[in-house]
Amino acid sequence: MGDSSAASGTSLNSSGRGAKAASSPAENYQLARRRTLQVVVSALLTESGFESAEKAAVETLTEMMQSYITEIGRCAKTYCEHTARSVPTLSDAVVTLIEMGFNVDTLPVYAKRSQRMVITAPPVTNAPVTPKSLSAGQKRTHPSHIPGHFPEFPDPHTYIKTPTFREPVSDYQVVREKAATQRRDVERALTRFMAKTGETQSLFKDDISAFPLIAARPSTIPYLNALLPSELELQTLEETDSSEQDDQTDSENAAGNVITDDPSADKENSVLPPGGVVPSTKASEDNVIDNPYLRPVKKPKVRRKK
């Protein structure tokens, strides 16, 4: 019998070696479980008196045993959850076997049979250890109300908040350097864009693509740039105009308040100007010249020497 079991075991091992190697841990676990069931089926065949078996017959018996064990586990889990429990007990397994038509009383006799073969347990593979460089923080353990067979908590870096923003730099020197760098980059990008899209001139006649220069375009009115004010001058002029208009409106409002506050004024005897139109401040605003070249000349103040 021992020789026959060894022969069956070697045949199973040879068939297992020919199979394609699994890649993922889940496939490795399923393959190891399948091999264990094949060894059990071979031992049961040896106990029954068989000396050899075909590969298709062993695979069929292995599939039947796997289906039977899976159905027992599923039914036991169902009875367990039906009674508001999460861990199946021996009573759930017994009820499941009775429901499936198995005689439970024959189990002790079958366990004490004389031709029983002992199968060595498969080697336990340790879980892969995560390198310290890839681990962040300490993993949380399950509280008392969560069973231990539940999956573990994920790594702490999956739910720990990590700020991704940086504090703004307030150093004067760093800010000025950053502004100068950004300005230089913008000028370079604009120069390259103009050189690629517009006309260019080259320093070398042989190689036109080397050191391209932006072609100078002659303007029809060359003195126009000298006459036009700069942005800073326009900004100062706008500020002075706005301040003068504010002063003018304040003075007009003060004059209107003085006239309306006079108790001796008679509104009924008030005489309208010729034309029947009340003068408004819009006429004075229209007289303000927006063109800087048409404004009256402002003479500079000359300080007299004492």
Image (spheres, grey):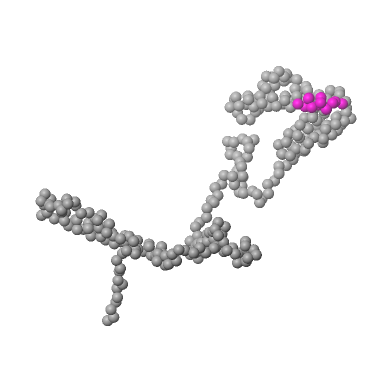
List the single residue furthest toward the front: 220
Question: In the drawing, does residue 222 fall left or right of residue 288?
Answer: right
Residue 236 appears in the picture as rendered: yes
Instruction: Give above or below for 222 relative to 103.
Output: below
Question: In the drawing, does residue 102 fall left or right of residue 251?
Answer: right
Q: Residue at x 66, y 51 (%)?
A: 133
Give, as a single range, the part of the protein colored magenta.
52-63
Q: Residue at x 25, y 54 (%)?
A: 282
Q: Position of residue 23 (x, y in %)?
A: 74, 39
Identify the image quadrant of residue 124: top right
Image quarter where the N terminus lies is top right
Q: Position of residue 80 (x, y in %)?
A: 62, 26
List the single residue furthest toward the right: 3
Instruction: Give above or below for 299 relative to 179.
Output: below
Image quarter where the C terminus lies is bottom left
Question: In the drawing, does residue 172 fall left or right of residue 264?
Answer: right
Q: Position of residue 193 (x, y in %)?
A: 55, 57
Q: Residue at x 84, y 23 (%)?
A: 48
Identify the image quadrant of residue 58: top right
Identify the image quadrant of residue 250: bottom left
Whether 57 is among the magenta residues is yes
The one of 201 and 35 positioned closer to us in this rendering: 201
